Image (tube, grey):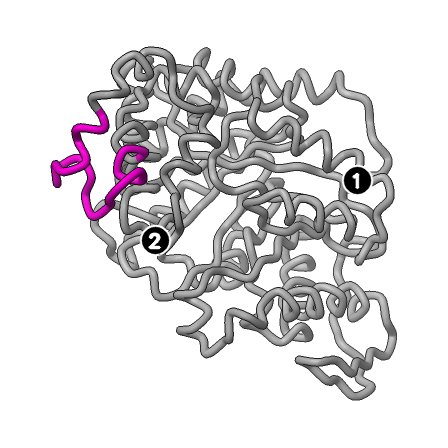
Amino acid sequence: MKLAVQYEMQRPTLDDHLVIEETLEQCILADEVGFDYLWFVEHHFLTGFSASPSPEVFYGALSRLTKRIRLGFGVVILPYHHPVRVAERVAMLDHLSHGRVDLGTGRSAVYEQTGMGIDPRDTREMWEESLSMIPKIWGSKIFEWEGRFWNVPPREVLPKPYQKPHPPLWVAALQPSTYQLAAEKGIGVLSFGASAPDVLKPHIDAYREAIRNAKPVGAVVNNQWCSSTLGYCGENNKEARELAVKSIKNFFGPGRPYVQDQKDIYAKLLESWGGVPDHLKQNFSRFVELEDKKDEVVDLSGGEAVSYAVWNRLDADTLCDRGVVIGGDPDSCIKALKLHEEAGCDQMMIMIQTESIPHEKVMKSLELFGKYVIPEFKKSEEKAPKTGSRL
């Protein structure tokens, strides 16, 4: 299983210049210690949460400052960009990095879509049309297109990618319908949302089965599943677990971008994180009594308030032992990652840099991953059979 570092570009006090400088330093170290991938989001208007609106610019610098780590777009929001420009920028970066680019795609959320003047009702079709166009742009001497959202008269589009036939294609996915769509189109899954591996396993198995009958949108099938979560590796197991769980609780806290305006989000998170553990079930009745306590339910109400109260009490040991969070000392992190590997995951991306974890601790965590954790997965990767259908 490959290991990756994921970035929203967060820090405790958002300073644009400082977060850029610190992130560059972290990414260079991630390359040096042996991480396989970097994945950067594209977000807009999320002040104080994400400072990554243009990963292609950031990757332009990293393409020359790193040597071997792959540079993954996690993701390009296709409805925001003309497909020709996406094809050009990704191909240019592929040359600058000597063939180290992966193209993840997605369509974002309503708050950002409306800020960009995009009708959310159109984004699914816009994503599909753009995704169909990009590999054809790369594979055609002269490209032309007449569609619903874009029209291109006969034109030669250069450069073509450095990788042949083209960079691997992926889609951001949060639900089974998108996993199925990825399989149908023969593209990789970027499974966001920090789910327990035993919860994801049936979906991974279904994806593997369905992709056998793919009608690939690109020149080849990218049969890979990549899961994501937050994490932190430290020398003190208890402290590191607590810090990692603090990160994920802040990340999915009330009002945060990934939960805002989502119906029953805490009930869904409870389910995706493996359900209510026995030691909380025994006291479940007392959570019902917390519905009217503002310090416990924040702005939630009814059954969702109860779900939040239970979710908020999921302890560090439960979340780390389940593999929901990759946290603790190196041995703890290895055990959690092995759960994902056993579930069929090809790659695990871990977000370490968050508002809860300062730059110095991120750097130390990267070093510990490189010294103790990554070597364990290099060994297993060397033993794994090669699969011709994967890029």
* Element under disc 2: loop
* 120 horizontally vs 298: left or right: right
Q: Residue at x 46, y 30 (%)?
A: 271
Q: Is residue 101 something that shows in the picture?
A: no
Alpha-carbon span between mark 2 and mark 1: 32 Å
Q: Residue at x 50, y 75 (%)?
A: 118
In magenta, the rendered stretch is 287-307
Q: How many marks?
A: 2
Q: Nearer the viewer, residue 258 or 27?
A: 258
Q: Quadrant of residue 70?
A: top right
Q: Amino acid at mark 1?
A: Ala
Q: Which residue is mark 2?
A: 260
For label 1, count other residues whose C-alpha is less than 10 Å away and answer few (under 14), some (14-19) or many (20+).
some
Tell me the quarter of the image containing the C terminus: top right
Q: Position of residue 390 (x, y in %)?
A: 79, 39
- Circles 2 and 1: CB atoms closer than 8 Å: no
* 148 horizontally vs 377: left or right: right
Q: Nearer the viewer, residue 359 or 306?
A: 306
First along the sequence among labels 2 and 1: 1
Q: Which residue is mark 1?
A: 210
Q: Quadrant of residue 205?
A: top right
Q: Amino acid at mark 2?
A: Gln
* 227 horizontally vs 320: left or right: right
For label 2, count other residues whose C-alpha is less than 10 Å away and answer few (under 14), some (14-19) or many (20+).
few
Q: Is residue 29 something that shows in the picture?
A: yes
Q: Residue at x 82, y 81 (%)?
A: 144
* Element under disc 1: helix
Q: Position of residue 268 (x, y in %)?
A: 44, 38
* 335 vs 343: above or below: above
